[in-house]
Amino acid sequence: MRYESTLEFAKAQDASDPLQAYRDRFHFPSSDADRLVYFTGHSLGLQPKPLRAAVEFELGEWAKYGVEGHFRAANPWYGYHELLTPPMADIVGAKASEVVCMNSLTTNLHLLFVSFYRPTKARYKIVSEAKMFPSDRYLLETQARFHGFDPDEAIVEVGPRDGERLIREEDILAAIDANADELALVFFGGVNYFTGQLFDMPRLTGAAHAAGAPAGFDLAHAAGNVPLALHDWGVDFAAWCSYKYLNSSPGNVGAVFVHEKHGRSFDLPRFGGWWGHDKATRFDMEPGFRPMEGAEGWQLSNVPVLGMAAMKASLDIFAEAGMPALRRKSETLTGYLEFTIDRLAKDCPDAGIGLITPRNPAERGCQISIDVAGRGKKLCDDLIAAGVFADFREPCIIRMAPVPLYNSFEDVQAFGSIMRGLLGQEAA
Ligand SMILES: *Cc1c(COP(=O)(O)O)cnc(C)c1O
């Protein structure tokens, strides 16, 4: 695609965008600026308009039926989570039996580690990425300690080389190889939250397996953003949240994937609760935990219906649009943001801004992180005041995500003009 920085070009692209109409299904925050550009779907997705009615509907069912709603509601609450499984499984490339929506992300990762991080004296190391999202880092530290290991010895972090920003795949493979005899687990983010780098999950999974260890992924920044084929890749387990690219509401319920090959491993250590117990005898209320088959066997508690109703309203939109079409638009739109930033860098050479995220579309989703060359938070605050929602990370990184469901080429073009204005003011 040959990009141009004019408003006419952006408008023409939007006019021929097959997903254009989806933008109107979301609520955009109000702003004093002429145009609000929402580029923070990597942190909290926008509210789908049908979501409120979906939640209100379940409140109505509760008012109408009380406890009987578990079985008499239009979508009985007893099995409400099952409605979310097919669309969620589609998003991550899994079989329905491999996915269940439950709890929140960090909670789910701890539960999955109970089953899949089984360190021994000889094999106890976790190969992972440096500068993980803090919650994941605390997960690894406390899991290592829980099993009696020193986190500094148990966690092998692979980071960028000196002077580089991205992690080289060859370095991850080398770390897996070098630690093969002591390896208990390979655990990575699918997409790094800071740089937007998308890792080659099938390759890392293959390398983990060749070293005799399982592979697990945190897909917080991957689910709903990049194409995933967890089943075919043979990934052992994964977990993600639903409030970033999946737009299901702040802090809402997350989801897990457990590969079919572990679905009948009933002797895998796990923490049990009544919702993971064999459905046929769940209400006999007898002792003797017998896990359900598949991912559902990791559930603990009964269904938080209001959150799941919100999630269903959001996943319905994904099912309708389809990940392949979303990905097609995402590549073009993210490419336009990359072009816009390159133009700014070229036209304002003194500004010193530069791209951090990989340039190869196969190695990124829709997030673009830029280095703003030592400018503090002020540039980001100015952007927000001018109507561009972006996110600042110390020391001088701005993260933006043009989300294919609700962002447009005109959004990207508007960001370019606003940023040009801000950098121009600086230069003057
Ligand atoms: C957003 C995010 C989290 C948040 O975890 P919660 O348990 O949902 O609060 C954790 N890890 C990563 C990588 C994230 O991007």
Image: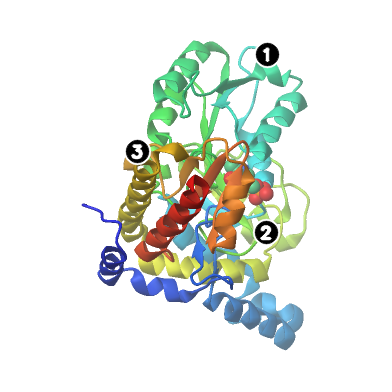
From this view, report whether residue 29 is shown above or below residue 302. Answer: below
Q: Say which residue label 1 marks.
A: 121
Q: Residue at x 61, y 75 (%)?
A: 76
From this view, report whether residue 56 is shown above or below residue 305. Answer: below
Foreground of the two, 353 or 208:
353
Q: Position of residue 214 (x, y in %)?
A: 52, 29
Q: Depth-wise, is mark 1 or mark 3 nearer the camera?
A: 3
Identify the image quadrant of residue 368: top left
Q: Say which residue label 3 marks.
A: 359
Give neighbour class at mark 1: few <14, some 14-19, many 20+ (Cα, 10 Å).
Answer: few
Q: Depth-wise, is mark 2 or mark 1 nearer the camera?
A: 1
Foreground of the two, 332 or 219:
332
Q: Position of residue 303 (x, y in %)?
A: 67, 64
Q: Which badge, 3 or 2, comes first in the chain's sequence?
A: 2
Q: Secondary structure at mark 1?
A: loop
Q: Which badge, 2 or 1, comes first in the chain's sequence?
A: 1
Foreground of the two, 182 or 375:
375
Give neighbour class at mark 3: few <14, some 14-19, many 20+ (Cα, 10 Å).
Answer: few
At label 2, which amino acid type do we have?
Answer: Thr
Q: Position of residue 152 (x, y in %)?
A: 69, 18
Q: Residue at x 27, y 65 (%)?
A: 13
Alpha carbons under labels 1 and 3: distance apart: 42 Å
- Residue 242 seen in render: no
Q: Say which residue label 2 marks.
A: 281
Task: Please name the colour scheme applied to the rendered image.
Answer: rainbow
